């Protein structure tokens, strides 16, 4: 069986992230203009820089990190593909990236994206 070989490297993923107009998106602290720098930090070879970027990114896109109860924010769905691509590109600390993706999925899964109107049945079985 052949070993897994990523089809793209971190540099390709980061260039694609730079092409997004992040200023049009918002995270929990305002315009998401800091997302490309945070993604670069996530892909860093420096352990402390990488961990700091992951935590900061988490506080920007996931209310869970700051103890705020609520759904994932607008920019989260735009960040997830880049995180997944970085993990697939086998960046250092890819396991930590997958942990953040898992937390995003957990928070998103626990929230009903379709609020119930009076008298309507819930759309999700667990709601």
Image: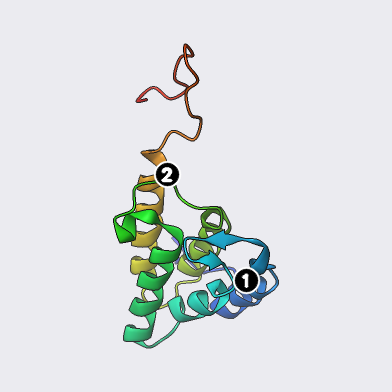
Residue 91 to residue 122: above or below:
below
Q: In the rendered image, is residue 50 in sight? A: yes
> Which quadrant of the figure contains the C terminus?
top left
Q: For this rendering, which residue is in front, 43 or 2?
A: 43
Residue 17: image tag: 1
Residue shown at 70% from the left, 72% from the top: 19
Q: Tell me, yes or no, whether the two marked residues, 1 and 2, touch with CB atoms within 8 Å.
A: no
Residue shown at 54% from the left, 75% from the top: 34
Residue 73 rendering spot, x and y as whole percentages: 50, 53
Residue 42 rendering spot, x and y as whole percentages: 44, 76
Q: Farthest residue to the bottom: give it.
A: 46
- Residue 7 lies in quadrant: bottom right
Residue 44 rendering spot, x and y as whole percentages: 44, 84
Q: In the rendered image, is residue 9 in sight? A: no
Residue shown at 58% from the left, 58% from the top: 78
Query: Is 66 on the left-hand or right-hand side of 24?
Result: left
Residue shown at 41% from the left, 86% from the top: 45
> Dot 2 lies on which element?
helix
Residue 108: image tag: 2
The crowding category of the residue bearing disc 1, from other C-alpha atoms within 10 Å (few below 14, some 14 to 19, many at least 20), is: many
């Amino acid at each position: 069986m052949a070993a897994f070989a990523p089809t793209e490297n971190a540099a390709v993923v980061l260039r694609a992230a730079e092409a997004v107009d992040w200023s049009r998106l918002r995270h929990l602290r305002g315009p998401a203009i800091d997302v490309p720098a945070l993604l670069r930090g996530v892909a860093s070879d420096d352990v402390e820089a990488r961990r700091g970027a992951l935590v900061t990114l988490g506080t920007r896109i996931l209310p869970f990190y700051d103890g705020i109860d609520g759904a994932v924010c607008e920019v989260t769905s735009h960040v997830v593909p880049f995180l997944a691509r970085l993990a697939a590109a086998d960046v250092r600390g890819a396991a930590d990236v997958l942990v953040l993706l898992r937390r995003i999925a957990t928070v998103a899964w626990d929230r009903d994206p379709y609020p119930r109107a009076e008298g309507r049945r819930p759309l999700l079985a667990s709601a």
